[in-house]
Amino acid sequence: MTEIENREKRAQEAKWYVVHTYSGHENKVRANIEKMVENRGMKDDIFEVAVPTEEYMDTKSGKKKVKERKLFPGYVLVKMIVNDESWYLVRNTRGVTGFVGPASKPIPLSDEEVKALGVQETIVPTVDFKEQDVVKVTSGPFENFMGTIESINMDKRKVKVFVSMFGRETLVELDFEQIENN
């Protein structure tokens, strides 16, 4: 089993948990958890951190503006496999007051609750390209350009591609969905 297949299998076993935070610190907590997961190499235990938001229309002095607000101020959702190390990392993140559940024992959300919260499951796509492949850009400002893949970042689902512009090779970062094999 490859490393990617193993990660996908573990991601399917992971559950969503609710973490209580200081109000107004939700995005900081998300960033801190993501940073610690990367630094400590815990990508196989903690998969995703989300702060559910919604867009709304705000009218100020006759001008309409689309704004975003948190659905649950003071809460962050974490998709993880609970073990001593992952529990400790999340529980001791600055701004976290604890997991939602009895005696700080995390209780996973049901599938229905996750759907109701509007958290989209991130599906890690299987990519059929590799470094040095020639690809075509299918959308965005570089649409219809051809380029050579320099590097692939599976976690962020991005590729760096050298695209020829004005006779020069320019390195651009694109999403997996923006390219296709030539």
Image: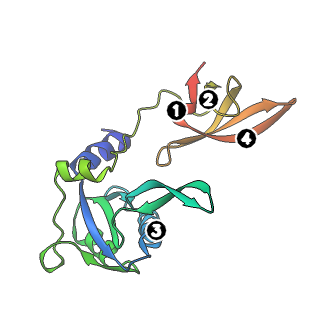
User: How many residues crowd around disc 1 within 10 Å: few (fewer than 14), some, or many (20 or more)?
Assistant: few
Q: Earlier in the sequence, mark 2 or mark 1?
A: 2
Q: Earlier in the sequence, mark 2 or mark 3?
A: 3
Q: Residue at x 48, y 58 (%)?
A: 68
Asked if marks 3 and 4 touch (Cβ < 8 Å), the reply is no
Q: Which residue is mark 3?
A: 27
Give the residue type that dot 1 points to: Glu
Left or right, 165 with reference to 31: right
Of the two numbered discs 3 and 4 in the rendering, the one whose residue sits closer to the viewer: 3
Q: Which residue is mark 2?
A: 139
Of the two numbered discs 2 and 1 in the rendering, the one whose residue sits closer to the viewer: 2
User: Which label is found at residue 87?
Assistant: none
Asked if marks 2 and 1 touch (Cβ < 8 Å), the reply is yes
The front one of 12 and 70 is 70
User: Which label is found at residue 177?
Assistant: 1
User: Which label is found at residue 171?
Assistant: 4
How far apart in space, not on screen, are marks 4 and 1 (Cα)? Answer: 17 Å
Give the residue type that dot 2 points to: Ser
Percent across and percent down for residue 32 are 45, 71
Q: Quadrant of residue 59?
A: bottom right
How far apart in space, not on screen, are marks 4 and 2 (Cα)? Answer: 16 Å
- Up the image or down, 48 lies above or below 176; here it is below
User: How many residues crowd around disc 4 within 10 Å: few (fewer than 14), some, or many (20 or more)?
Assistant: some
The front one of 24 and 105 is 24
How far apart in space, not on screen, are marks 3 and 1 (Cα)? Answer: 26 Å
Of the two numbered discs 4 and 2 in the rendering, the one whose residue sits closer to the viewer: 2
List the single residue furthest toward the top.
182
Percent across and percent down for residue 77 are 31, 62
How far apart in space, not on screen, are marks 2 and 3 (Cα)? Answer: 30 Å
